[in-house]
Image (cartoon, grey):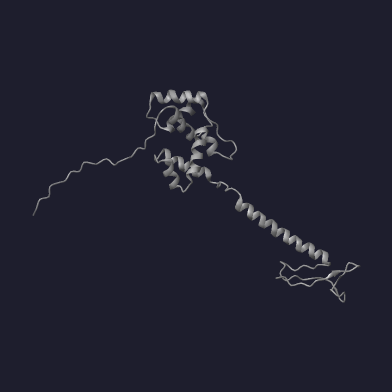
Amino acid sequence: MSSFKIVYEGGQEKSVNEDSSQALSHIIDEDYNGLETIATHSQFLESRNGDRISEVSESAQTENQVGSPSIPPPKRSKTTRQFFKLKDEKLLSAKAAAKQLNVSARVTQHWVKKYDENPDNLFNHGKKGRKKGLTDEHRKCIKEFITEDTSVYVKDVMDHLVLVFGKINVSKETVRRFIANECNLTFKKVYKQPVAKNTFCKPVRKM
């Protein structure tokens, strides 16, 4: 609790006690951060009110932060990439992928919807120079390329687009989704197993 004396401001702008018997040159508030010389009672009240306003502002700011909707973390793009990697490459269901990443199923449903509309807007949210979607020429080129060989990888399709059109501003996720949705192709995970080697055992002669 603050320790201070009640003083009054006289007609000559001097601070005096309640009984006007003694003039005071300054007031010290022991609970105030940093001792400060205050010439008049008005300055003291102004100083105290300023502190209270600051406390109220900080309190209101804290309440607004608690009551306001949660803001997506800065690394949301990384989490969404992990989600679609689990879903598309690991062949996990959306629910299983969301559970593994500790993300709400409702949030992942929103991601899937936005991904279907435009993957680049989802992954490059808030970034300058975001990538564009596929053009009609890109789509036609992809369909012609995979018609010749349906076992190609997404990387092969990307390389072919660069070979035909030069440097393109399209993400790999956009191409993958187009192939899956528009070309009726599915992605399967390839499991590599070691090839059993032929072993030749020499007969051991017992002594």
Report the front residue among 59 and 156. Answer: 59
Q: Residue furthest left?
A: 207
173 left or right, relative to 59: left
Q: Where residue 152 appears, x then y in whole percent?
A: 39, 30
Seen in the picture, residue 80 relative to 174 is either above or below; the reply is below
Residue 84 falls in image quadrant: top left
Q: Which quadrant: the N terminus? A: bottom right
Q: Residue furthest right?
A: 12
Residue 181 falls in image quadrant: top left
Report the front residue among 166 and 29. Answer: 29
Q: Residue furthest bottom?
A: 21
How many numbered discs sit on the rendered protein?
0
Report the front residue among 97 and 63. Answer: 63
86 left or right, relative to 48: left
Q: Where residue 90 appears, x then y in whole percent?
A: 39, 41
Q: Where residue 134 appears, x then y in whole percent?
A: 51, 28
Q: Which quadrant: the C terminus? A: bottom left
Seen in the picture, residue 3 relative to 81 is either above or below; the reply is below
Report the front residue among 50 and 82. Answer: 50
Q: What residue appears at the point 46 percent right and 32 percent down from the top-left corner? A: 177
Residue 60 falls in image quadrant: bottom right
